[in-house]
Image (cartoon, rainbow, N blue to C red):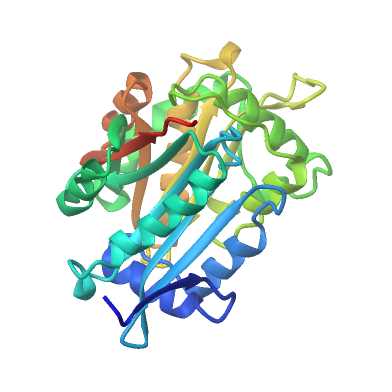
Amino acid sequence: MTDLSIRDLRAPADFAAVAAVRNAAEPDWPVTPELLERWHAVRDPALYHLELVAELEGRIVGHLGVGHDDFAFQEDRYWGSLTVHPEFRRRGVGSALHSRMMDVLVGRGAGEIRTMLAEDASAGLAFLEQRGYRLAWTRLDLRLNVADVPQERFDSLLHSVAERGLQLVSIADLAADPRRDERLWELDWLLFQDVPMGQALTKRPLAAWVAEELQDPTFEPELSFVVLDPGRDDPLTGPYVGYSTLMGNPGGFYVIGMTGVLRGYRRLGLAKALKVAAMRSLSARGGGEIRTFNDAPNAAMVGMNEALGFVRWPSRLRYELHLERP
């Protein structure tokens, strides 16, 4: 297609057009130009990242971002996404973006490329399978509207937490703790070791973790809670023994980032209590929808979420392309 061009993204000039493409392609998960600019700014410059746009008829109609994954880093493994505006599909846009990406990554000695799509995105899944990608992992998408859940159902649960001498405190209310961010960083790393995600994880530097998590514009510290054990003073996490986070989305809903409790504090209902605390705080604001993702093998968390009232939506599927290097 002679009028189709592929070029590097120009930041920040292209972010408005890229947001428009992404929102048209996946209106259920909207983004803003400001969020794209923020995420671009805090990306680790030590890790490789390629970002391309496709222009057709003088308009940005496609976007591709791919690079090293700071969450699960491996030198020859890349994680990315490719989006084409629905009005411009079946015109070679996705193929051109993918071809340019492959030229670059093969030249870098890539051994594996990963991406994720919703299981009902049939055209996108067919695109991947035609190019040799194969299904490797399933992540469940669960959603709940707090207005549909009678909050009094959980009074006894919260009472039992208090009876054990444990406290549920919002991350906003812990701002006076000079070690709050460091303790949450250490706690987050410990908790992720027990999440069945099908990959080895990378511990991000403290400053990067804080910038990407606690300082992200979507993070809601008043709706994110920590379980404190006042009688505990661990050198890494202090009295922090579990936590759960919520992020707001421009679409008006909220997304759970992490929920977990240290091993010695499990089977006490604390993970559920953390989510209940968030639900009650959100109800006090006027309510809303909460979404969460659980990896399919994490049966305990899936069961707990469904007991809270979460219902399943089409899952997210991780596809992988394994490359043979010379």
Residue 27 visible? The answer is: no
**Quadrant location of the N terminus?**
bottom left
The image shows residue 317 at horizontal and vertical percentages of 29, 38
Residue in front for this viewpoint, 245 or 134: 134
Is 259 left or right of 190, judged from the image as shown?
left
Determine whether 3 is above or below 142 in the image.
below
The image shows residue 315 at horizontal and vertical percentages of 25, 39
The image shows residue 211 at horizontal and vertical percentages of 69, 53
Determine whether 98 is above or below 10 in the image.
above
In the picture as drawn, the residue positioned furthest to the bottom comes out as 58
Determine whether 242 is above or below 68 in the image.
above
Residue in front for this viewpoint, 263 or 285: 263
Residue in the picture at 47% in, 66% down = 52
Residue in front for this viewpoint, 181 or 194: 194
Residue 77 visible? The answer is: yes
The image shows residue 75 at horizontal and vertical percentages of 61, 35
Residue in front for this viewpoint, 135 or 118: 135
Is 74 left or right of 299, judged from the image as shown?
right
Residue in the picture at 21% in, 44% down = 130
